[in-house]
Image: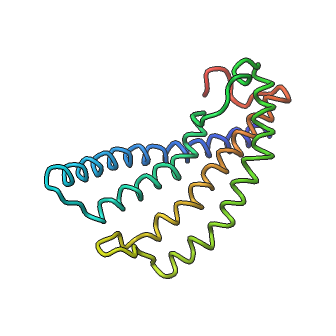
């Protein structure tokens, strides 16, 4: 049975690792877009709505789609005053309870409520209301449920690993694979 859970956790990790690599390239793209926008504003004294909207579309992509990979790498901000001093079993308890009582219900609520929002945007192929804006606003709205699904499944993997640590059976041997 532990082999099933180990495989499931690794599959989830691989999904978020893969998405995280795509998001990393997205950060390079947003840097280039912001650079172009700044040069256009300060050198040529002009700006384009499309460029400005592209910036926030890319930021939305990075933050929403990268959140699962950030959880995988334990990169989310938390108050570590006590957590860092606890042993592995106490940390596992905190992670397990946090996943069960906060992460899963919160992600579920956001996914369920954002699905209709995204569906409506896709059904009308929603675009920017501004002249010269991006005609694909529906895509960025689709990142909301997708991003929270990635966080949700990574939270499930964290919860599974934490549960096995609590009961004294680490899923991953020392040193990873």
3 relative position to 26: left or right: right
Residue at image position (25%, 63%) is 48
Q: Find residue 168 and report its image quarter.
A: top right
92 relative position to 54: left or right: right
Q: How many numbered markers are drawn?
A: 0
Q: Residue furthest right?
A: 167
**12, above or below 119, in the image:** above
42 relative position to 2: left or right: left
- Give the percent coordinates (x, y) of residue 38: 24, 49
Q: Nearer the viewer, residue 54 or 97?
A: 54
**34, above or below 138, in the image:** above
Q: Quadrant of the C terminus?
A: top right
Q: Nearer the viewer, residue 177 or 92?
A: 92
Residue at image position (67%, 60%) is 110
Q: Nearer the viewer, residue 50 or 42?
A: 42
Q: Find residue 158 and report its image quarter.
A: top right
- Give the percent coordinates (x, y) of residue 99: 75, 43
The colour scheme is rainbow
Q: Quadrant of the N terminus?
A: top right
Q: Residue furthest bottom?
A: 124
99 relative position to 140: left or right: right
Residue at image position (31%, 45%) is 31
**149, above or below 14, in the image:** below
Residue at image position (78%, 37%) is 96
- Give the percent coordinates (x, y) of residue 162: 76, 34
């Amino acid at each position: 049975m532990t082999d099933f859970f180990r495989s499931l956790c690794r599959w989830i990790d691989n999904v978020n690792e893969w998405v995280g690599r795509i998001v990393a390239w997205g950060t390079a793209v947003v840097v280039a877009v912001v650079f172009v926008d700044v040069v256009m504003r300060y050198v040529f004294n002009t700006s384009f709505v499309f460029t400005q909207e592209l910036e926030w579309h890319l930021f939305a992509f990075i933050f929403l789609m990268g959140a699962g990979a950030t959880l995988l790498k334990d990169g989310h901000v938390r108050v570590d005053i006590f957590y860092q001093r606890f042993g592995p079993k106490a940390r596992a308890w905190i992670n397990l309870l946090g996943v069960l009582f906060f992460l899963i219900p919160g992600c579920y609520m956001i996914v369920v409520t954002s699905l209709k929002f995204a569906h409506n945007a896709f059904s009308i192929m929603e675009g920017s209301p501004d002249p010269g804006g991006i005609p694909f606003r529906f895509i960025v709205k689709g990142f909301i449920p997708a991003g929270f699904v990635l966080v949700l499944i990574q939270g499930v993997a964290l919860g599974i690993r934490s549960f096995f640590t609590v009961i004294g059976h680490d899923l991953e041997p020392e040193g990873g694979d």
